[in-house]
Image (tube, rainbow, N blue to C red):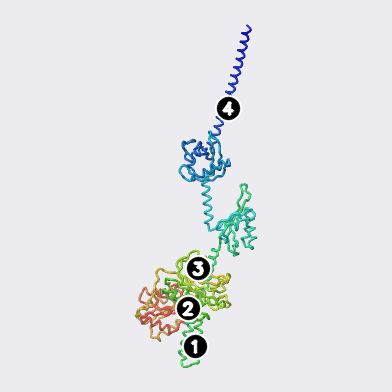
């Protein structure tokens, strides 16, 4: 009985232990289930975080780069079929596979890497610039690389575009901190200020590059920018590395932080040297045109007055035959008229309104002919040296006027080197003028791009001070005391009438170079033959002249030479009416060039429409109607430059009536 009770108690104890174990197992099972549920929830949360991340995420085997996981953005970027693409490796998406190996090596050495810039290929094989942040982890029992990427391709393109625009822009870009110390410079800024490397400027105050007299305006400008005022571009005098000054236009602004506080200054700088040069050339051209008009008008009136004086002087000389004393006095008067006539001719040269007989000219031949003349003025002939170019083309020009230009150049050089005893070099060169050439030196007659024959005279004299350079072509101006004539002024007018350019290069202490550029034509036309190659059909002459004193002199002289009838008109319009009424009796039209209502050439052109064989002789003090043309271009048989002698007129008329091609300019 006692044994049975013990067995029962032992059984009950065993049952209690079994119940406790079952209860414990149930608790463990419950906890395990709870842990498994929590783990599943955690995995789901992390998976959602990876899938919904706003950037590509990949997990790949560290050794062979097999892709173990890729979130949707990574799948989209690399064209993967799913989060665990079979057989795909990250190595195939690196433009340079060695970059992946370097990244793994760095991770093993440092454990984590951020900001690694690498070029990767997207699903279509296009290169994309990525910033990689990576670390080594253990994933499914393997050493793996967890990597996130940020695509900065568009940002790099924008940066490259910005740098290209900055580097290629004709304007310069600069940044400075709030103290005014320069922190960034574009290449254009360096060249503008004469520097070659940014280190020469960075860290220095921008005030060092502005002329002292502009410092106060600069401070005002900076304070205005800080206060939010934008007054537009400002003009300052910039200081180059060599100490020279140039004009610059600066437009600035303030770069601000997100909270609106100022962070730095930003400037756009433009070199105004070319604009100033163009403005100076424009002002010079306007001045030249104004002075030219005045000179031409004065010369025209003087020539008319000289013509009257010359005509009556010849009449008195013919009446004074046998009176030696009177003849001597009249000869002195004639010499004075001749000298005054030369000055009037130079004034016409300066105005660019002289008649010229254009023909193909060999500039080298002109120089050689002039050498013999100029060397007579030099105490040491060896100072003149000529370097001719090879295979130089002919240029359409008036040879006599070209000689005047060259003489003015050479005489200017002789005066400059009289005391220095330096050599004078003359050159003829064929040159293609480019835009860059037009920025060098001073251009009283503005240059333009194209093909030119350059005539150059260089001296080793003292040079021309910068403040006097713009006046060297002014009438009677000289850097050696009192001016003695029109010189370069007349040369400038001649060049303008030839559509030629003038360039002056001069540095104080290093001499002066004068360059004339004659345009080269593909086809150089020969000089036009006068229209008077045949004999006029009648001896009648129609004289058109608005100055009554000259008109009366000529009309009174013609019958003495056997011409007639003689008709007179005071302008081109009246001459045309007279021609209509007396066409059959008129064989030649003798006319002044510039007259009111209608010019002589215009009237002659209208008459030749009626009778193409009509002959004409042009008298002129200057001819605005011609511009850069010639008398021959209007079909005149010859021309006379006022004041002329009666003998010149007589010979010209005889040449026309005899049919010989002869004309006096």
CA separation in Å, label 1 and label 2: 33 Å
CA separation in Å, label 3 and label 1: 44 Å
Query: Percent x, y for residue 518?
Result: 46, 71
Residue sitting at x 44%, y 84%: 646
* Label 3 vs 4, first from the N-terminus: 4
Which residue is labeled 3 in the image?
Answer: 446
Which residue is labeled 1 in the image?
Answer: 331
Query: Percent x, y for residue 318?
Result: 45, 89
* Label 1 vs 2, first from the N-terminus: 1
Mark seen at residue 35: 4
Query: Percent x, y for residue 141?
Result: 53, 33
Q: Indicate the secondary structure of the residue bearing disc 4.
A: helix
- The correct choice, above or below, for 606 with respect to 335 in the image is above
Q: Quadrant of residue 15?
A: top right
**Closer to us: mark 4 or mark 1?**
4
Query: Percent x, y for residue 163?
Result: 53, 53
Which residue is labeled 2 in the image?
Answer: 371
């Amino acid at each position: 009985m006692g044994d049975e009770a013990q067995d029962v108690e032992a059984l009950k104890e065993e049952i209690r232990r079994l119940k406790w174990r079952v209860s414990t197992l149930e608790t463990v099972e419950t906890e395990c289930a709870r842990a498994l549920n929590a783990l599943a929830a955690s995995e789901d949360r992390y998976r959602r975080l990876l899938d919904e991340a706003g950037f590509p995420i990949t997990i790949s085997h560290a050794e062979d780069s097999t892709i173990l996981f890729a979130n949707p953005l990574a799948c989209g970027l690399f064209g993967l079929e799913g989060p665990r693409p079979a057989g795909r490796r990250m190595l195939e998406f690196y433009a340079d596979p060695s970059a992946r190996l370097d990244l793994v090596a760095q991770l093993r050495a440092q454990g984590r890497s951020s900001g690694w810039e690498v070029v990767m290929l997207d699903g279509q094989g296009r290169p994309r610039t990525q910033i990689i942040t990576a670390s080594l982890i253990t994933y499914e029992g393997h050493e793996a690389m967890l990597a996130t990427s940020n695509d900065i391709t568009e940002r790099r393109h924008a940066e490259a575009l910005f740098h290209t625009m900055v580097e290629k822009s004709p304007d310069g870009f600069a940044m400075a901190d709030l103290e005014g110390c320069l922190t960034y410079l574009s290449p254009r800024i360096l060249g503008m200020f004469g520097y070659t490397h940014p280190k020469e400027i960075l860290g220095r105050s921008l005030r060092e590059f502005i002329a002292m007299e502009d410092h106060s305006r600069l401070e005002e400008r900076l304070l205005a920018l800080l206060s939010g005022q934008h007054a537009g571009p400002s003009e300052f005098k910039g200081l180059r590395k060599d100490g020279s000054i140039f004009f610059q236009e600066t437009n600035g602004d303030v770069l601000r932080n997100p909270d609106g506080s100022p962070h730095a200054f930003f400037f756009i700088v433009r070199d105004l040297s070319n604009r100033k040069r163009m403005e100076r050339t424009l002002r010079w051209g306007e001045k030249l045109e104004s002075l030219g008009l005045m000179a031409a008008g004065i010369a025209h009136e003087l020539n008319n007055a000289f013509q009257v004086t010359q005509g009556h002087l010849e009449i008195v000389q013919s009446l004074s035959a046998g009176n030696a004393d009177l003849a001597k006095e009249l000869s002195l008067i004639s010499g004075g008229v001749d000298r005054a006539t030369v000055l009037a001719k130079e004034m016409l040269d300066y105005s660019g309104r002289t008649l010229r007989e254009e023909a193909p000219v060999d500039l080298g031949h002109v120089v050689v002919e002039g050498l013999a003349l100029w060397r007579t003025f030099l105490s040491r002939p060896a100072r003149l040296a000529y370097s001719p170019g090879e295979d130089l083309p002919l240029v359409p020009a008036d040879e006599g006027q070209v000689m005047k230009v060259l003489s003015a150049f050479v005489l200017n050089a002789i005066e400059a080197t009289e005391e220095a005893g330096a050599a004078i070099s003359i050159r003829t060169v064929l040159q293609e003028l480019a835009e860059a050439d037009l920025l060098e030196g001073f251009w009283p007659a503005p240059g333009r791009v194209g093909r030119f024959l350059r005539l150059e005279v260089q001296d080793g004299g003292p040079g021309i001070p910068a403040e006097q350079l713009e006046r060297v072509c002014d009438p009677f101006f000289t850097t050696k005391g009192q001016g003695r004539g029109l010189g370069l002024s007349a040369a400038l007018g001649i060049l303008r009438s030839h559509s030629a350019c003038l360039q002056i290069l001069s540095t104080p202490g290093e001499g002066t170079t004068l360059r004339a550029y004659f345009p080269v034509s593909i086809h150089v036309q020969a000089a036009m033959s006068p229209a008077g190659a045949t004999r006029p059909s009648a001896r009648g002459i129609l004289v058109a002249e608005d100055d009554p004193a000259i008109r009366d002199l000529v009309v009174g002289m013609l019958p003495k030479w056997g011409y007639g009838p003689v008709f007179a008109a005071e302008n081109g319009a009246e001459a045309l009416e007279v021609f209509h009424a007396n066409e059959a009796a008129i064989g030649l039209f003798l006319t002044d060039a510039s007259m009111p209502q209608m010019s002589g050439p215009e009237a002659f052109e209208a008459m030749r429409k009626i009778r193409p064989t009509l002959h004409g002789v042009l008298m002129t003090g200057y001819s605005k109607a011609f511009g850069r043309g010639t008398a021959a271009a209007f079909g005149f048989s010859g021309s006379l430059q006022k004041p002329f002698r009666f003998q010149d007129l007589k010979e010209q008329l005889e040449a026309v009536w005899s049919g010989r091609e002869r004309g006096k300019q």
